[in-house]
């Protein structure tokens, strides 16, 4: 494998731009909460800078390692991710936040195993599809075994529960199977079964039913289940074309809960307006275009599937987050890649981006 000296400049610049905007918006959206909760307006900013530093180091590390290395250790990576998903479910080990037992505490910090599983499963699927793509058209030999693996991971994530991450994982993997040549009727059958399963998931947990009803008519319960989406819309609405100005948001003053995480796009829309929100969407569109281009030009099948899986994961997650914030779909509780506050999410996002950048350094010979 021949390596270029530099990665794709446009892809790299897009990632850096999203990261820098994210750091600025984390501070702008969080300093009120940070001052109130921790008596330190820079609390979230300092931690985000630390996470970003670790993430950039991880991105550089993965950008320098030939992506074929991950193919050799795909099984070990996947088994490790499954192990972490099992460990987080152990009472007293997994930490519960927002009703989900999704974190494992390590000193003053914590990791979210489901974030590792997204990347780990993409690496493993890429290795399997590269080696056995010819079987993907067979339902029993190719499609079904991989489907069972994907939904085993999804099931463990749902035990936490973490529906948002589970949806991103499944959709990213489905994109890979589709690109590998799985038959349309496989997806049609999966769609029927998936729809039934999705209904059962909603009916099995009252809070999910509440989210659906809040999505359909949030003003029916404006102080309860509809509160978050209403406050999000109240943030975006006054932004108009140019926004109220960076740092001048009103919704971050204890109206929109934890605005630096899942709903950071709301504050961005309020402060930077339609122009700022459109800029973020265009940056993700640019990320998707360059990522797909990198995947298509990879010199082997593993690189193509790996690149496709990573760019699908990042852009699907961004699309879901923004759709939730502007009220297009029910609240799922998922971060906006590169922008939202968070340790595991940001670090693993940058680590994935590093692998994509490494693929961009390869040339066909």
Image (cartoon, rainbow, N blue to C red):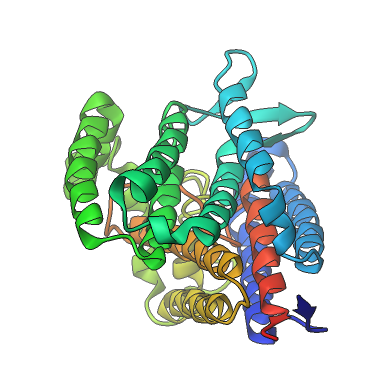
Is residue 288 placed above or below 183 in the rendered structure?
below
As drawn, is 365 to the left or to the right of 6?
left
As drawn, is 353 to the left or to the right of 265?
right
Q: Residue at x 59, y 61 (%)?
A: 339
Q: Is residue 126 visible?
A: yes
Q: Residue at x 56, y 52 (%)?
A: 260
Q: Count up the numbered dots.
A: 0
Q: Nearer the viewer, residue 80 or 57?
A: 80
Residue 303 percent location from the top left of the image: 61, 68
Residue 79 percent location from the top left of the image: 62, 35
Q: Residue at x 45, y 82 (%)?
A: 275
Residue 276 percent location from the top left of the image: 49, 77
Is residue 304 placed above or below 172 in the rendered structure?
below
Q: Residue at x 76, y 66 (%)?
A: 66
Quarter of the figure with the C terminus:
bottom right
Residue 149 percent location from the top left of the image: 44, 39
Is residue 125 placed above or below 290 in the rendered structure?
above
Is residue 206 placed above or below 254 in the rendered structure?
above
Quarter of the figure with the N terminus:
bottom right
Q: Nearer the viewer, residue 11 or 71?
A: 71
Q: Nearer the viewer, residue 212 or 288?
A: 288
As drawn, is 328 to the left or to the right of 145?
left
> Looking at the image, which residue sits at the far top?
91
As drawn, is 227 to the left or to the right of 306?
left
């Amino acid at each position: 494998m021949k390596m270029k000296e530099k990665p794709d400049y446009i892809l790299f610049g897009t990632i850096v731009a999203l990261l820098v905007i994210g750091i600025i918006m984390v501070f702008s959206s969080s300093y009120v909460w940070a001052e109130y909760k921790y008596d330190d307006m820079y609390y979230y900013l300092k931690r985000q800078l630390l996470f970003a530093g670790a993430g950039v180091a991880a991105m550089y590390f993965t950008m320098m390692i030939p992506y074929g290395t991950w193919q050799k250790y795909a099984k070990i990576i996947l088994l490790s991710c499954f192990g972490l998903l099992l460990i987080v479910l152990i009472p007293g080990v997994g930490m519960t936040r927002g009703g989900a037992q999704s974190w494992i505490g390590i000193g003053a910090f914590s990791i979210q195993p489901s974030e590792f599983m997204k990347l780990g499963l993409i690496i493993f699927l890429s290795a399997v599809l590269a080696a056995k793509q010819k079987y993907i058209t067979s339902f029993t030999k190719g499609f079904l075994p991989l489907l069972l693996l994907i939904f085993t991971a999804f099931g463990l994530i749902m035990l936490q529960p973490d529906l948002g991450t589970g949806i991103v994982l499944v959709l990213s993997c489905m994109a890979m199977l589709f690109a590998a040549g799985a038959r349309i009727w496989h997806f049609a059958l999966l769609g029927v079964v998936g729809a039934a399963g999705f209904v059962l998931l909603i009916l099995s947990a009252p809070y999910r039913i509440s989210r659906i009803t809040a999505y359909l008519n949030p003003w029916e319960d404006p102080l309860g289940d509809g509160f978050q989406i209403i406050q999000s819309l109240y943030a975006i609405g006054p932004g108009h074309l140019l926004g109220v100005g960076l740092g001048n948001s009103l919704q971050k003053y204890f109206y929109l809960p934890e605005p630096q995480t899942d709903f950071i796009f709301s504050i961005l829309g309020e402060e930077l307006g339609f122009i700022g929100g459109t800029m973020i969407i265009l940056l993700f569109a640019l990320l998707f275009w360059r990522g797909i281009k990198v995947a298509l030009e990879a010199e082997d099948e593993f690189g193509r599937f790996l690149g496709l899986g990573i760019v699908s994961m990042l852009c699907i997650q961004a699309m879901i987050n923004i759709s939730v914030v502007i009220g297009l779909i029910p609240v799922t509780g998922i971060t906006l890649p590169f922008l939202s506050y968070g340790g595991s999410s940001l670090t693993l996002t940058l680590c994935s981006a590093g692998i994509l950048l490494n693929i961009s350094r390869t040339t066909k010979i």
